[in-house]
Amino acid sequence: MNERFTGYNKARLDARPDRLFLACAILALSIALIMSAALAGTTAFRKEWQFASEARV
């Protein structure tokens, strides 16, 4: 019984770096997606503001 439990813990320890890598990859992709969405929104807002300024003149 104890041997099976030790093997289970060893399997858990072996799987842990893969989970950490997966979590870091998901976090990095999420940050990239948010940054690209913010950049696209800022660009659209600047163009809209530029058109509004030209329309006023």
Image (cartoon, rainbow, N blue to C red):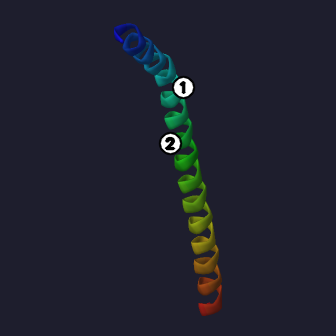
Q: Amino acid at mark 2?
A: Leu
The residue labelled by disc 1 is: 18
SS for callout 2: helix
Spatial CA span between label 2 and label 1: 14 Å
Which is in the foreground here, disc 2 or disc 1? 1
* 51 and 10: which is toward the camera: 10
Residue lying at 44% horizontally and 21% vertically, measured from the top left: 12
Q: Earlier in the sequence, mark 2 or mark 1?
A: 1
- Measured as percent of width and height from the top left, residue 47 is found at 64, 74
| Extreme residue toward the front, this view | 1
Q: Is residue 3 left or right of residue 55?
A: left
- Measured as percent of width and height from the top left, residue 24 is found at 51, 34
- Measured as percent of width and height from the top left, residue 51 is found at 65, 83
Rendering quarter of residue 42:
bottom right
- Relative to residue 31, is residue 18 depicted above or below? above
Residue lying at 60% horizontally and 55% vertically, measured from the top left: 36
SS for callout 1: helix
| Crowd class of label 1 (few under 14; some 14 to 19; many from 20; radius 10 Å) | few
* 40 and 32: which is toward the camera: 32
Q: Amino acid at mark 1?
A: Asp
Residue lying at 60% horizontally and 86% vertically, measured from the top left: 52
Residue lying at 58% horizontally and 61% vertically, measured from the top left: 37
